[in-house]
């Protein structure tokens, strides 16, 4: 497989890097400090067509594909991983509508998602004793229960929701924000990715029309597996972007920090730390591009996405450990960017649910 980017993908990546430098670098530290939702930055993402990057042109999308999405997320995460996380959550919802939506569902939602008129969210996981259940009624469906740790909860206007429809069956639904009986819980205060809103959702007799069903009834398990694979790609791209930013900062620091009459960059131990961290970023980037290209070509990509997730889950935090080690006590100080990057990368590598195991997907492909 050719891993070289097309000219269009290179231009999109360059545009994302320029946007990140101009629009996100100035606000990243303040966003990490106060955690306020960056509405202006999200509006600017829409202005760059990043919110509809992979969506079809017929619905207002840029039709640039998923390799381009990975490139954009990496570029944004290097400046503000919180803003990249908002785009990632939006992309999951937009993908679900585009992939499995009916024509009326697509006409209703995709143009608004592409233009940024509506922000998307995906409520897939849950925790606690009150799982979300969907019961079919003559008027459609009634949802009761909770969904946990939903990114973009609050600002999102459309939520793709997974709900149990039986003991062993699941379906996906399109739920509009503001639906009667839907409540957004108290915003969480995560240690990283601050600015990307996170909250639980509570459903109390939320009535949905039959047309809110996404995909086939009781067919949600296969759809969730596909969404989990895409989640691995979008979170992995953020990991690589954060890690690459940390490597670049540590390398610049090593060239200017002088000890015993010479820059610490001349020390073999420092060179080894930087080389290993840069290698991890490079290999992760190639794995993500490989999986994203399969998705662009309409081929199965779940195993490759799981491999990228497994690799970056192991290596993500190590990249930050190595780069902080290069900068020593200065790197550990809050006036430097590495502590923020350390917290952010934890949010892209820690799994939202203990059962979210990429090893199971990889092993199943080998043992089938």
Image (cartoon, helix red, strand yellow):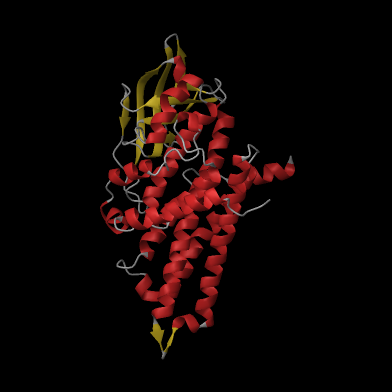
Residue 248 shows up from this direction = yes
Q: Position of residue 107 (x, y in %)?
A: 45, 23
* Of 220 and 96, the residue lying toward us: 96
- Image quarter where the C terminus lies is top right
Residue 356 shows up from this direction = no
Quarter of the figure with residue 346: bottom left
Outermost residue to the bottom: 261
Q: Give the vertical position of 134 relative to 149 (above or below).
A: above
* Of 137 and 245, the residue lying toward us: 245
Q: Position of residue 244 (x, y in %)?
A: 48, 62
Q: Position of residue 40 (x, y in %)?
A: 28, 45
Does residue 175 appear left or right of residue 68 in this picture?
left
Could you tell me which residue is drawn at 36 percent across and 42 percent down? 47
* Of 310 and 112, the residue lying toward us: 112
Quarter of the figure with residue 293: top right
Number of numbered discs overlaid on the protein picture: 0
Q: Give the vertical position of 338 relative to 203 (above or below).
A: below
Q: Position of residue 31 (x, y in %)?
A: 29, 53
Could you tell me which residue is drawn at 51 percent across and 43 percent down? 231
Does residue 15 appear left or right of residue 229 in this picture?
left
């Amino acid at each position: 497989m050719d891993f070289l980017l097309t000219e269009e993908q290179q231009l999109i990546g360059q545009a994302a890097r320029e946007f990140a430098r101009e629009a996100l670098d100035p606000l990243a530290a303040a966003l990490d400090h106060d955690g306020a939702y960056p509405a202006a930055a999200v509006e600017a993402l829409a202005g760059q067509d990043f919110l509809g990057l992979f969506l079809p042109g017929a619905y207002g999308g840029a039709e640039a594909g998923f390799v381009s999405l990975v490139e954009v997320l990496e570029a944004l995460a290097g400046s503000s991983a919180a803003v990249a996380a908002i785009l990632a959550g939006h992309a999951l919802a937009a993908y679900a509508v585009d992939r499995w939506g009916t024509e009326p569902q697509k006409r209703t939602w995709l143009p608004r998602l592409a233009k940024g008129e509506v922000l998307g969210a995906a409520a897939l996981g849950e925790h606690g004793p009150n799982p979300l259940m969907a019961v079919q009624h003559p008027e459609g469906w009634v949802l009761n229960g909770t969904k946990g740790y939903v990114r973009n909860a609050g600002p999102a206007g459309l939520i793709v929701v997974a709900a149990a429809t039986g003991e062993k069956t699941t379906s996906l639904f399109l739920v509009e924000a503001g639906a009667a009986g839907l409540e957004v819980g108290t915003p969480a205060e995560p240690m990283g990715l601050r600015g990307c809103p996170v909250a639980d959702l509570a459903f109390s007799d939320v009535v949905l029309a039959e047309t809110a069903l996404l995909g086939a009834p009781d067919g949600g398990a296969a759809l969730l597996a596909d969404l989990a694979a895409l989640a691995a790609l979008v979170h992995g791209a953020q990991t690589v972007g954060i890690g690459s930013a940390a490597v670049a900062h540590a390398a610049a620091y090593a060239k200017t920090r002088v000890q015993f009459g010479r820059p610490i960059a001349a020390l073999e131990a420092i060179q080894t730390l930087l080389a290993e961290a840069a290698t991890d970023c490079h290999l992760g980037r190639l794995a993500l591009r490989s999986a994203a290209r399969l998705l662009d070509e309409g081929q199965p990509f779940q195993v490759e996405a799981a491999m990228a997730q497994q690799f970056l889950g192991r290596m993500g935090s190590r990249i930050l450990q190595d780069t902080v080690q290069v900068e020593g006590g200065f790197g550990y100080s809050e006036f430097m960017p590495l502590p923020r990057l350390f917290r952010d990368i934890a949010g892209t590598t820690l799994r939202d649910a203990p059962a979210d195991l990429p090893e199971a997907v990889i092993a199943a492909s080998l043992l089938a």
